[in-house]
Amino acid sequence: MKRYDSRKTSYLPENFYNIKADLPELPPPPLNPATGQPLRPEELEPVFPRAFIQQEISAERFIPIPPKVLEIFSIYRPTPLIYASALRKYLDTPARIFYKYEGVGPAGSHKTNTALVQAYLASQEGTTTLTTETGAGQWGSALAFSCRQFGINARVFMVRSSYRQKPGRRIMIELFGAQVLESPSPTTASGLRFYEKDPNHPGSLGIAISEAVEAAVSQPETKYSLGSVLDAVLMHQTVIGLEAMKQCEEFGIEPDLVVGCVGGGSNFAGLSFPFLGKRLREKKSGPRFLAAEPEACPSITRGELKYDHGDTAGFTPLLFMHTLGKDFVPPAIHAGGLRYHGMAPLVSHLVKLGLVEAKAYSQKQIFAAAELFLRTEGILPAPESAHAIAAVIDEALEARKSGREINILFNLSGHGFLDINAYDRTVSGNGHG
Ligand SMILES: *Cc1c(COP(=O)(O)O)cnc(C)c1O
């Protein structure tokens, strides 16, 4: 049988890939919530650095990666593309399974890819502090690391249920030198509304975003940073797919199916958009693209495609996306990074165009998938990433039934070492149902 060594290339892309250059039609634009009119870029200036806004609205196919960012990327990129031979053997499937492992980055997930760009761009415009929200803490730790690299402060509103369930990442964020606040907090009007009624309110990403945006717009040298959903953020993550394309070439394979888990959609987009763009440009039938989401927060499979706010207070522009409604408070599942009511407009648009499929998995299914992955491949996945693994296992078993020798490529978006307590409850049998 053919062997696939996990790492040969030292290829680092020098540009991000912008799928908007290759789409047959663009998604409906973001709207100003006050006027209902398409948002003008200047209107975002109190919130985001100007260079970031330029990237958000750009239709150029390639956007250069700033050299200072490339330098730090080169510490942990390219990330390995690994052939999951033991998982394949266990599943007794003719499907070949490959995964891109983003857990090797400084904060243990793909989120560092965009955090570095955002912190760098902010630091170039005299911004002294970036505010943000975090669910499970992966985004908060990635941004805290990145702000430290470029000499600016990070203030992180952390969803209370995660703050209490997952002290590991809160400690990481603080060790990187950033400030962490439990959200809903009493420090903003949007947090106080909930905090006053219940100081133990579990919080949600929607509320934490409102708090972080409010804290940013009230100070001129403070800007806001978002870890997913926006077009520019998805674009920053395409380093994953650009590297993977090169690595697949070296393996001499082409994926038939590309899989990723989706919270806001960025790691899935990062892996799939370069492959999807190639398929659109060459007008050939290319791979299938499958997004895996939690049953507890099923924005694509159960949500509605419509204009909605990105946050609970309604500060953010109206985005045309798959949404469960801005007031939806998802149950406190362990995949905190997937507890978001909406879905990236670009991913939502590709679902509408029939280019992306979605499937939802229960917490029980994803913990079983994670355990199998650990026992075969030896890596403990983040509970978020375990959604992708559950989908891959399903597809590999389908391939066994039909005898098809397909190539499956998926994104292992992060490791789960700091989620170890969540996994402990599985073992003792009193956590996940
Ligand atoms: C945040 C996170 C996700 C979900 O966010 P996306 O924007 O959908 O990628 C998935 N996996 C990990 C490890 C995360 O930290």
Image (cartoon, rainbow, N blue to C red):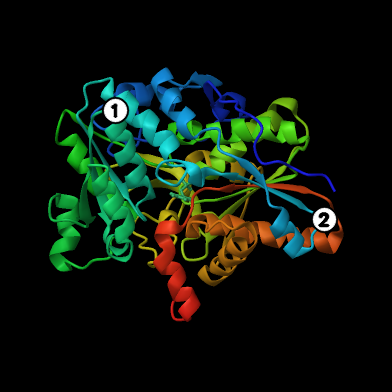
Left or right of 304, for residue 164:
left
Q: Which residue is mark 1?
A: 150
> Percent from the top left, x then y, of residue 413?
52, 48
* Residues at circles 1 and 2 in contact by the CB criterion of under 8 Å: no
Q: Is residue 265 visible?
A: no
Work out whether 276 lies above or below 425.
Answer: above
Q: Which residue is mark 2?
A: 94
Left or right of 328, for residue 284:
right
Provide the secondary structure element on which disc 1 rests.
loop
Work out whether 10 lies above or below 263.
Answer: above
> Percent from the top left, x then y, of residue 415?
48, 53
> Percent from the top left, x then y, of residue 79?
55, 38
Q: Nearer the viewer, residue 190 or 115?
A: 115
Work out whether 328 lies above or below 242.
Answer: below
Identify which amino acid the numbered label 2 is placed on.
Pro
Q: Is residue 320 visible?
A: yes
> Percent from the top left, x then y, of residue 250?
73, 31
Q: Residues within 10 Å of mark 2 (few under 14, many from 20)?
A: many
Q: Nearer the viewer, residue 57 or 364?
A: 364
Provide the secondary structure element on which disc 2 rests.
loop
- Disc 2 CB within 8 Å of nearest ligand 1 atom: no
Q: Which residue is at a point 48% across and 81% down the rendered structure image?
A: 429
Q: Which residue is at a point 54% across and 72% down the rendered structure image?
A: 364
> Looking at the image, is mark 1 or mark 2 earlier in the sequence?
2
Q: Which residue is at a point 27% across and 53% down the rendered structure image?
A: 171
- Disc 1 CB within 8 Å of nearest ligand 1 atom: no
Identify which amino acid the numbered label 1 is placed on.
Phe
- Alpha carbon distance from label 1 to label 2: 47 Å
Q: Residues within 10 Å of mark 1 (few under 14, many from 20)?
A: some
Left or right of 77, for residue 318:
left
* Res 112 → quadrant: top left
